[in-house]
Amino acid sequence: MRPKENTKSGKKQVKYSYLKEQFRLSPQNDTDNKQANLTHYLQNIESDAGKCFLNKETTKYLSDIENISVSDDAGIYPALKLPIEWDIPFPPPQDPKFTFIDLFAGIGGIRLAYQRQGGKCVFTSEWDNFAKITYEKNFGEVPFGDITKIKEDLIPDHDLLLAGFPCQPFSIAGVSKKNSLGREHGFLDKTQGTLFFDVARILQTRRPKAFMLENVKNLVSHDKKRTFSIIQDTLKNLDYNVHYQVLDGKHFVPQHRERIIIVGFDNRVFNGNEDFRWPLMPEVSKKIADILCEIPEEKYTLSDKLWSYLQNYAIKHKEKGNGFGYGLTNVNSISRTLSARYYKDGSEILIPQKDKNPRRLTPRECARLMGYPDDFIIGVSDNQAYKQFGNSVVVPLIESVAKQVASVLNNHTHKNEPKKLKDYSL
């Protein structure tokens, strides 16, 4: 296989799209993380992080494809001696200011926000196969699967841990059993069996300088506030200084979407003196009309049957005193929160149309409602796209936080750089 080379820049390069084709990447079928290892190696080939991914999984995957040799000087397929031209929407930064890992990554909204601030992603994990498709199309990287099955030593050193972990109740069964046996229990025992445990174990073993976690607003009150209390205690026991705040996406996009953001900095690095400040929220000025397509396809208009059902459903619940019902959106205002169930009927955000039934948003409009740029590739079905954007983050809101976190990290790096000696040579 002779690689197609791009010489427009004056340097020979091999396109990622060519490597993707030759390596037969199929993210939804990567059940053993071999493609994840390979693409992570490609992304980090020139850094120490790449060594974590040049392993038996990578070499086995390559050797299974037309007997590609892995014994040359590059350590891998000869084409990779050439620099890679990342012909994807969001390539890795050329001169990164800091590194991060992206856990429970979804389709990469958090990554996009931090990458725009000069961050370099060195590890990604996401269990949903359809989300992996979208992620790879935009970032040129197949995420690793189930984080609970990934050992810490596979994860490279990084400056920042990012995670939009699911909200789960913490069971006290494990702790109660140890108490009954008269055994001491560690602070991580309370989180065992939840996905937050995996965030905590990685923080404990890899000790990044900082982290940012994102979750639903209800995390604060979940399980009579017990869930959030355990999360805070765990992070503090790991010796991180914790900041948290509920922020609303309506300041950046025309959607009411409240999320809690938790930011922490390693006390062993910053001594609790990091100058972190939450971003100021701009005035609410966006409206739904700003994100609408000019001529949406007719398939997004509700059928007579569905529209009649939604109206009758709303009437029935109104009579019972419930607030359930469809949301006919004022296009000159903001919408309700887009949820992952939007694919079912689109009822929470319906767009009125003149002389016809209302319609649901198109996937591209959902992308815009979450703050994704129009060059973000939607490479899955409409139903999957609705789920993905409904589960995602408001990108510009996260980016506003990313600016503040990156500022702390970058200022610390500059302060601790060794001073250069003056050169008195002739």
Image: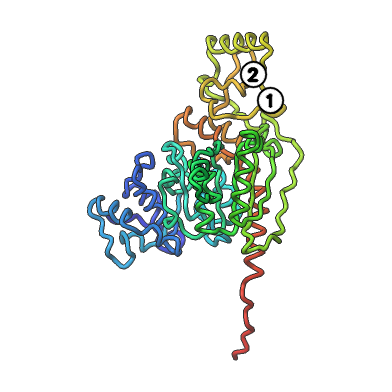
Q: Amino acid at mark 1?
A: Val
Task: Kindly indicate whether the residue at mark 2 contacts the one at mark 1 (C-beta within 8 angstroms).
Answer: yes
Q: Residue 412 occupies which quadrant of the picture?
A: bottom right
60 vs 210, left or right, is: left
- Residue 195 on image: x %, y %: 50, 42
Residue 318 drawn above or below residue 173 = above
Circle 1 sits on which residue? 331
Q: Nearer the viewer, residue 125 or 400?
A: 125
Q: How is the image coloured?
A: rainbow
- The residue sitting at 61% across, 33% down in the picture is 223
Q: Is residue 35 left or right of residue 382?
A: left
Badge 1: few (under 14), some or many (20 or more) residues near its Cα, within 10 Å? some
Image point (62%, 64%), residue name = 269
Q: Judging from the image, what secondary structure is the residue with disc 1 in?
A: loop
* Left or right of residue 24: residue 417: right
Callout 2 secondary element: strand
Residue extending furthest toward the right? 283
Q: Is residue 334 above or below residue 50?
A: above
Eyeballing the image, is 313 above or below 241?
above
On the image, the x and y values in percent for residue 135 come to: 47, 43
